[in-house]
Amino acid sequence: MDYSEEKITANIVQLRKLKQLSQSAVANILQVDVATISRIERGKIALTYHALADIANMFGMSVIDLITYPEVYSRVNQPWVKVRVELELTTEEWEKFGMKDKVKNLLEQ
């Protein structure tokens, strides 16, 4: 699969045209100059993750789907749940509450 920047910018152009959006309309939505959109589409400006995220959001898709377009990235048969937990514990509390063992057991499952 080709995930080059040239392919990604081609995906952006294809999606923009599919959604019948002008470069001016895209620039207005993303709050940038039309020249910036033109340079992105011509590969004159390197795409940052932030720019990819903004463009993907504008098209109502994820960054990975923008990159892999027209195929849709999916984790087949994987029910994923994203969980982020941040705890502030002293080393003593960490061990006292058995957190080390609990985390280890969860990671081993």
Image (cartoon, grey):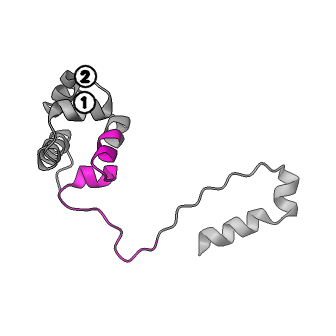
Left or right relative to 60: residue 69: left
* Tag 1 secondary structure: helix
Q: Are marks 1 and 2 in contact (CB under 8 Å)?
A: yes
Residue tagged by mark 2?
33
- Amino acid under label 2? Asp
Whether residue 11 is visible = yes
Q: x, y percentage for residue 92?
A: 88, 54
Left or right relative to 81: residue 33: left
Residue at 23%, 55% in the rendered image? 68
- Amino acid under label 1? Ala
From what the image shows, is residue 51 above or below residue 92? above
Front one among 29 and 69: 29
From what the image shows, is residue 96 above or below residue 27? below
Is 62 colored magenta in this rendering?
yes
Question: Which stretch appears magenta?
Answer: 54-79
Residue at 38%, 36% in the rendered image? 50
Front one among 103 and 50: 50
Q: x, y percentage for residue 106?
A: 64, 71
Residue at 75%, 68% in the rendered image? 101
How packed mark 1 is, by other alpha carbons closer than 10 Å (few <14, some 14-19, many 20 or more), is: some
* Tag 2 secondary structure: loop
Q: x, y percentage for residue 40?
A: 20, 30
Residue tagged by mark 1?
27
Give me the C-alpha separation between circle 1 and circle 2. 6 Å
Residue at 77%, 48% in the rendered image? 88
